[in-house]
Amino acid sequence: MEPSAPGSPDATQTAPGSTSPTLAFGPYRLLQKLGEGGMGEVWLAEQTRPVRRQVALKIIKAGMDTADVVARFEAERQALALMDHPAIATVFDGGSTPEGRPYFAMEYVKGEPLTTYCDRQRLGTKDRLELFIQVCEGVQHAHQKGIIHRDLKPSNVLVMIQDAHTVPKIIDFGVAKATAQHLTERSLFTELGVLIGTPEYMSPEQAEMGRLDVDTRTDIYALGVLLYELLTGALPFDRKELRQAGIAEIQRIIREKEPPRPSTRITLLGPASTEAAQNRHTEPRRLISELRGDLDWITMRALEKDRTRRYQTASSLAVDVRRHLNNEPVSAGPPSAAYRARKFVRRNRLGVIAVATLLLLLAVFAGAMAVQAQRIARERNRANQERDRANQEAAQARKTLAFLTGTFEVANPRKGKGPSATATEIIDDATKKLNEMRGQPLLQASLLMTLSEIYDEMGLYEAAESPARSALEIREKALGPNHLDVAQSLNNLASIWRKQGKLEEAEPFTKRSLEIREKALGPNQPDVAQSLNNLAIIWWNQGRLSEAEPLLRRSLKIREEALGPNHPDVAISLNNLATLYAGQGKLAEAEPLYRGSLEIWEKALGANHPDVATSLNNLATLYVDQGKLSEAEPLLKRSLEIRERALGPNHPDVAMSLNNIADLYRDQGKFSEVEPLLKRSLAIKEKALGPNHPDAALALYNLGVLALQRKRRLEALAYMRRAIPRFAGTSYWALVDEDPDIASLRADPEFRRLVADVVKNAAGGKDEKK
């Protein structure tokens, strides 16, 4: 147990006329009174034999030792002595003081309340749930011994460090049951009856004050309140409202009023939601997303008014929480095919990352289509609307599940291509199956968008273009030209074109996406920031750096204000603004922005995420520009290692890393090591991007520079002949005018003829790295 702080609501005043027990008896010496209530008191004591240790002594107060109370106290002491669980404070001994007052000695827990500890440590949802499972296991053990706590709350679950492990300890088991009153002023007493427990954590049957038998399920309800508070930082019912109400109103609220779901509670907290999210090491939108679904269902089932509908045991509640942590279906969740399919995908995401991401999104899209079905049926009467919505959801769930099953069968050795099936083959096969969904155009469009995004992430930009086009056409036809889903499709298709070097095609689509989003959402939303960012990237790739900069600044400001300073999207804006500055030669301004983006990505995504590789690559490139070659090399090698492991050996980002390491080795004079890196980079870019892509041309150009440095003039001209025509209209054209590495070529007649017909109106720039 823990001493109550001065002024704590758990501390109680000494009752008038009470007397203290003898300060030393048997093996115990009383040191300090820890707490006092109507019928008992708790002391910190030193035990001198058979071992020396500090213990907590619970003693019945003088004048309360009637035969009935003493008999119940003795029975409770015996029951507590039977319990032996790491999550329950251990009972060591029992007896009577020299005055004849019963006592028992318990483990003295030096800890702090569960919620206080979690908030102080800023534990995330997963770590909080791990501690909660241990509490459930302790309660289950007590129930098996026939003990009902009846006052579970954070101050009765203390967290301590034991053998280097964080351990919750449940205290005050059974005291309320043994004495019919609790030892803190939080328990309410009236002439009409006794509310045993704490109102905020009290079950409906407890609030009946004896009209119903209280069984172990009252502790399940209290565990539900405790879980609610751990997840949201708030109680199901407002503490002030309960405390100011009379007994009848407290009973009505507890018995009849339905609390909001945890995810909804976060939205109702207003400005306080930011603090609640920060205490859980996240931000409000992400916290709401974490709670929506499993944790909403689990918590609300534990808080059911009808105890027959609650979890029947503490262990079944713990099992459901564990299943959520393992991404398995929970018993509290609806048993729909789409839900179970989503869980299956999450459990198997390590098989093929791209395919697993696809399947996870499919389940989400199935839910979105159910909402769309409800909108379509709005003009029907309510009964028909509900029936149609249910039928639509069930049909979509069946089709989604069939789609998932068919996709996985590609890798089934008895039905498909077996273990040799690649991620690309699986996705290609899934694309063919989409033709079966033409009767559900919006679902088909969502699945096409997902396939396009997976191809995009794999660096297969040409393959990504076709499903993105089809999704856009379907959405424009079904939703009209100004719908937000159309804006999403426009943005994604433009992004694919940009990565292919098709800047003229990408620009108007990006502008149209921006216009739709600003009109529908207002000027300061994250989706608007995304369109601003993408338009800026197009402009700087066209050499329009002065026009791109204000867009990137505005995008960064929106993301910081809307998402918080540590969101991964903020890191994207920091990275891109830094790259723009580096292209303008503002190296000192670029460096802190690169460092900031790296810090955010490492913290939010882990050390081995591709976005972390992007930030490492860009910071290293800046170091090269600053002449810090020895500092740049380990960052470039780590970036390459992450990209090869996460994206595969033939991804365009891998080619970029190879090119940058080659540039570094060339600056160090290691010419023999440069050529194989550049040739491998060229092969990847030509295969993934096509031979006419500007980035493939850059690889040819770099090989030409290398040949020139190695005195191979004819070979250099041959590479330049292939590269320079593809630089037209891109920021790479600045190399032709300004690169000192080819100064000796500019006087060559053949070189001059080569560039004579190419437009020279582009100026400056640096590779876009994100």
Image (cartoon, helix red, strand yellow):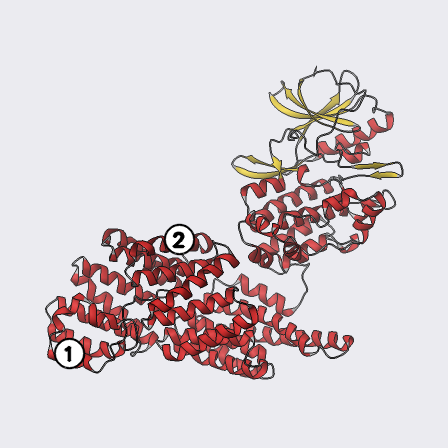
Query: Residue 88 got which mark?
Result: none
Q: Amino acid at mark 2?
A: Gly
Residue at the spot 31% in from the left edge and 71% down from the top edge: 543
Is residue 620 among what the camera can see?
yes
Discs 1, 2 touching: Cβ within 8 Å: no
Q: SS for tag 2?
A: helix
* Residue bearing mark 1: 752
In the image: residue 11, left or right of residue 193? left
* Residue bearing mark 2: 596
Residue sitting nearer the eye, 26 or 581: 581
Residue at the spot 58% in from the left edge and 78% down from the top edge: 442
Q: Position of residue 237 (x, y in %)?
A: 73, 49
Q: SS for tag 1?
A: helix
Relative vertical location of residue 121 with respect to residue 655 in this rendering, above or below: above
Relative vertical location of residue 240 with respect to residue 686 in this rendering, above or below: above
Q: Earlier in the sequence, mark 1 or mark 2?
A: 2
- For the residues labelled 1 and 2, the Cα–Cα distance comes to 43 Å
In the image: residue 507, left or right of residue 223? left
Q: Amino acid at mark 1?
A: Arg
Q: Position of residue 3 (x, y in %)?
A: 65, 29
Q: Residues within 10 Å of mark 1 (few under 14, many from 20)?
A: few
| Res 324 quadrant in image | bottom right
In the image: residue 416, left or right of residue 46? left
In the image: residue 534, left or right of residue 111? left
Residue sitting nearer the eye, 151 or 719: 719
Residue at the spot 50% in from the left edge and 74% down from the top edge: 515
Q: Position of residue 215 (x, y in %)?
A: 79, 45
Q: Residues within 10 Å of mark 2 (few under 14, many from 20)?
A: some
Relative vertical location of residue 99 with respect to residue 416 in this rendering, above or below: above
Residue at the spot 83% in from the left edge and 25% down from the top edge: 64
